[in-house]
Amino acid sequence: MLSALGLDTTAEAVYRTMLADPGSGVAALAARIGTTEQQVRDGLDVLSELALVRPSAENGGLRAVSPDVGMEVLMARQQAEIAAQQQRLEASRAVAAQLIAEYADLRPATISPGVEQLIGLDQIRDRLARLTREVRHEVMTFAPGGPQTEGNIAASRPLDAELLGRGVRTRVVYLDSVRHHRPTVEYARWTASLGGQVRTVASLPTRLIIVDRSTAVIPVSSEDTAGGAVVLTGQGTLTALCALYESVWAAAQPLGEVPVRDVHGLSAQESTIISLLSEGHTDETIAKRLGVSARTARRIANDLMVRLGARSRFEAGVRAVQHGWLPAQSG
């Protein structure tokens, strides 16, 4: 009956028997349950992993944790797992965008209609330059990776000035981490002064440029954005990518506004870190997603664990659900 909480039939029987007869040893438990001693030991391993049995201070053996405490821990653990799954489901469109980029791995002879391969930085730059010349109405951009380099900023200024001077609408979403990088902030404010729109979010699914809602450019690999890219023009693909962009844009915050915190006092960056921690991501992975250093990601994660009173990252996920920091799904 408790299989949904991680207990198999034997582990549940062992737990119930230990509650009824706290002094039973392995042999006695096996006899009462009607199973082998090895199966009892396997059940105890499961119970120990789920923190449903603890060493006894009286006889050195194991004792069952009371159900009111044990079931709360199991329910919190299940809620954390459900919350992590919910986060993954909500990110499905972002995953779809990444999968679309994998078309670039196909051989040129079998490349699908509406998918153009770009190999190397030169081809990417040439194609982007042509798209910049051809754009008539709007450019929508995801710019992950954190603060922009001085070289990138210097190269982008004349292109931005030319586009905005022609009345092209530009929208860029950066990571929240750029708010602490003065050159990037100054560049974004300069863009805004010319009519461009800039917002930030805690994390982005991929680097992306959409031109006139008819052409999109996505890197083949987020690990090496200069290595290759794909140009996508299929109507269905562009509809999905534009929907993804609008969803992220609606949730993003204008750069000129002070970042808001949720009802728990968490910034968007902190909330994202909690979600990533609950999914088991490392400091390095979290740092890359947020565009910060691994040291910064580790510091924020540790601060959040202290606020939650958690001694491990798994416990932090459980406590985050208990505190309402992560969504819980009933049922």
Image: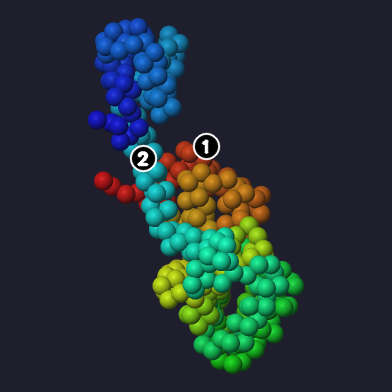
Numbered disc 1: secondary structure:
loop
Numbered disc 2: secondary structure:
helix
| Mark 2 or mark 1, earlier in chain | 2
Q: Which mark is residue 78?
A: 2
Question: Mark 2 is on which residue type?
Answer: Gln
Task: Classify residue 91 by image quadrant.
Answer: bottom left
Task: Kindly give the residue lying farthest to the front in the view shown.
Answer: 109
Which residue shows up at 66% across the image and 54% down it?
293
Residue 106: percent from left, percent from top: 55, 61
Which residue shows up at 67% across the image and 78% down it?
126
Eye-nearest disc, 2 or 1: 2
Task: Kindly give the residue lying farthest to the bottom in the view shown.
Answer: 166
Residue 196: percent from left, percent from top: 57, 83
Residue under circle 1?
312
Which residue is more in the foreground, 317 or 28? 28
Mark 2 to mark 1: distance in Å? 17 Å
- The answer to whether one can see residue 179 in this image is no
Question: Mark 1 is on which residue type?
Answer: Ser
Which residue shows up at 42% across the image and 41% down it?
318
Which residue is more in the foreground, 116 or 278? 116
Which residue is more in the foreground, 207 or 317? 207
For mark 2, does the 10 Å Cα neighbourhood hold few (<14), some (14 to 19), or many (20 or more) residues?
Answer: some
